[in-house]
Amino acid sequence: MSDIPSEPPALPNSRRQPRNPLEPSSTSDGDAQAAAGTSRQTRRQAMTAQEVRNFDEMFNTIFNAVDKQERAPLSLWPDGKAKEGVPIIGIGRGRLRSGAAQQRADMFTLRQQSRKIKWTSADDEELDSLREEMDMCDTDEQLLNWAMENLFGPPEGAKTATTTLDNAFPRHPAAYPHLLAKLMQTFRDKYQDPHVALSVFKHAAERSIPSYVFGCTTPAYNELILTRWTCFRDLRGVHDALTEMRANAVRVDEKTRRIVEQVRREVGTREQWMDGVEQEDGVGAVLRANLEGGESAQLMKKIEELIVPRGKKKVKKPSRFSAENEDWKRSALKEDDDGWAFDRWAGKEFENEDVRWKGKGRSYGRKAEHEEDKLSL
């Protein structure tokens, strides 16, 4: 037993170093051993310092570009409660989109966040004080200067040396849509300047994405539609404004429906206002040609479709008493085909019916036989 080796026998050289099938079979054993030794000596080389720096710069450039599009500083949040670095645009690191698509996604995200802003008593007091300041302006120039400073100006405490992102959000996010609508109404009705009212809406819409989302809401769009119609009789402008509301997820309220109803009534009685418009450089002639061509009817149809609330269509389940289930009653209404008539009780058909009913059940047949036995007695 002492002669038995404790170690396993060594494998043959051919199994320890398998020959490459792509190499020619004429290779000698010495050449194979040399090739095997060379393969064992080959190592993975490490990256040089210059290559490491180049890769670091490349990855930093990619990640910084994504962070700039998906993240915003703390000053971009209107309530100041958001944590620094929390993404406000999109979810995760998705596929990079074009500028228009990215702006549209940002707008819808901010639109959802703007609806979550709760109205408090402090916001109510702030709105009342700002409205009083607007009413104290004696001229339209003073009102415009007040709006550029207090409504469209940078937030309180913002540094002038910072980027435009610090001034992206409005100064009063909760009262901003109501003040914008009040400003447009004041320029249109009090100062009889509808052009400035339209310019105010355009300035708020093009100032920044947060300015459009928080300011150009349903009250501002209502004033825009009312200004375009009452001051310019712009039916196509009314249609375009409602189309923007539908495309940008701006809800339609009861005041919007009342304005559209007013437009519909006045379009029906267009002869009352066409004569006054014809005096302005031939604009009335163009409007008359459009109205006579049927364009007003098509626009009104589209306008009425735009104010209809959108929702999921409910599929009605078939009723138990539907027309298809009651189809068997139609054959019973055909009196000429049943073979029955008044005061006609005997006959072949009646006998057949009697036999059929008797044979339908054993108990019924026994009862009928018992009745016949009684009559025979």
Image (cartoon, rainbow, N blue to C red):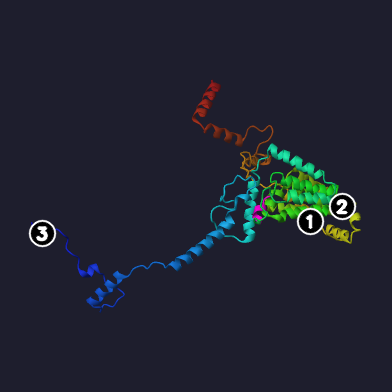
- Residue 300 image offset from top left, x and y in percent: 78, 52
Label 1 amino acid? Arg
Within-10-Å neighbours for mark 1: few <14, some 14–19, many 20+: some
- Viewer-closest of 106 and 237: 106
For marks 3 and 2 on the same chain, the one whose residue lies earlier in the sequence = 3
Q: Looking at the rendered structure, which numbered label has been put on residue 270?
A: 2
Q: Which residue does the image show at 64% across and 51% down from the upper left?
A: 108
- Residue 124 image offset from top left, x and y in percent: 72, 39
Q: Which residue is mark 1?
A: 236
Q: Are marks 3 and 2 in contact (CB under 8 Å)?
A: no
Label 3 amino acid? Ile
Q: Quadrant of the N terminus?
A: bottom left
Q: Are marks 1 and 2 in contact (CB under 8 Å)?
A: no
Q: What residue occupies the far top of the structure in this picture?
A: 377
- Viewer-closest of 220 and 55: 55
- Marks 1, 2: nearer the viewer: 1
Image: 29 above or below 141: below
Label 2 amino acid? Arg
Circle 3 sits in a helix, a strand or a loop, which is it?
Answer: loop
Q: Quadrant of the C terminus?
A: top right
Q: Can residue 137 be seen from the camera position used here?
A: yes
Asked which quadrant contains residue 102, the reply is bottom right
Q: Which residue does the image show at 10% across and 59% down from the upper left?
A: 4
Q: Which residues are magenta?
A: 164-169
Q: Are marks 3 and 1 in contact (CB under 8 Å)?
A: no
